[in-house]
Amino acid sequence: DTAVSQTPKYLVTQMGNDKSIKCEQNLGHDTMYWYKQDSKKFLKIMFSYNNKELIINETVPNRFSPKSPDKAHLNLHINSLELGDSAVYFCASSQGTGGMNEQFFGPGTRLTVL
Amino acid sequence: KNQVEQSPQSLIILEGKNCTLQCNYTVSPFSNLRWYKQDTGRGPVSLTIMTFSENTKSNGRYTATLDADTKQSSLHITASQLSDSASYICVVNKGGSYIPTFGRGTSLIVHP
């Protein structure tokens, strides 16, 4: 059973398009996250939701809009895609907020903007 | 500025050998430090978490150490296996903050 799943795994699109990445967790966690990992493998947190409420928004362009319809889902919509958006996006979840709570990561979505 | 620095950036060792990865941080106030293993094409997986009062913690062949005074941590891998080839990421959490600070990782390659 997949704990944290993301779709799609690969996404190739043209500059200027709008795209969405979906994330679901079946761990019963109340907190979910989106991370961006650049070409140098550096992971950076983008957003975090706790019980469907936004608690972290790390200076991400407003072209990125997360949506959490319920505690088990956190989707990421990206408008007007740019070349610099090319990266691997990871979804994660944890029970509770704060660093003591282990985060479980999804397999990642590799986004390529042409 | 809160930072996490990892060294070396990359490391190549022969199967069966031991190795040690380093993590130095300036994050303050310190809450805890976690080591993740990230296999190629997959998400990170937690190996161990260290709190202020812990000096050493083991998880199988992985042993993490923490010196909170010098703000240094290490991850020692014993009797390396091919499956240890991965990126190892050090993450430090600041007290009172939800936002983790990530290191850039050490890429480990284990050759047969």
Image (cartoon, coloured by chain):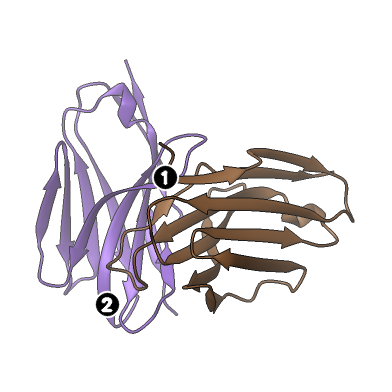
Chain colours: A brown, B purple
Front in this rendered view, residue A93 or A80 = A93
Could you tell me how far apart the alpha carbons at marks 1 and 2 are, in whole angstroms?
Answer: 30 Å
Q: Is residue A55 placed above or below B8 in the rendered structure? A: below
Which residue is label 1 attached to?
A3
* Numbered circle sitting on residue A96: none
Q: From this viewpoint, is residue B103 visible? A: no
Task: Pick the quarter of the image with the N terminus of chain B.
Answer: bottom left
Side of A81 relative to A67 (left or right): right
Q: What residue type is labelled 2?
A: Phe
Front in this rendered view, residue B68 or A101 = A101
Q: Which amino acid does label 1 sit on?
A: Ala
Side of A67 relative to A47 (left or right): right
The residue positioned 29% from the left and 59% from the top of the image is B34
- Residue B110, x across and y down, in percent: 34, 25
For disc 1, the neighbor class at 10 Å (few under 14, some 14 to 19, many from 20) is some
Do the numbered discs 1 and 2 sit on residues whose CB atoms are within 8 Å? no
- Residue B43, x across and y down, in percent: 46, 44
Dividing the picture into quarters, in which one does residue A84 lie?
bottom right
**Secondary structure category for the residue under label 2:** strand
* Numbered circle sitting on residue B30: 2
The residue positioned 53% from the left and 54% from the top of the image is A91
**Secondary structure category for the residue under label 1:** loop
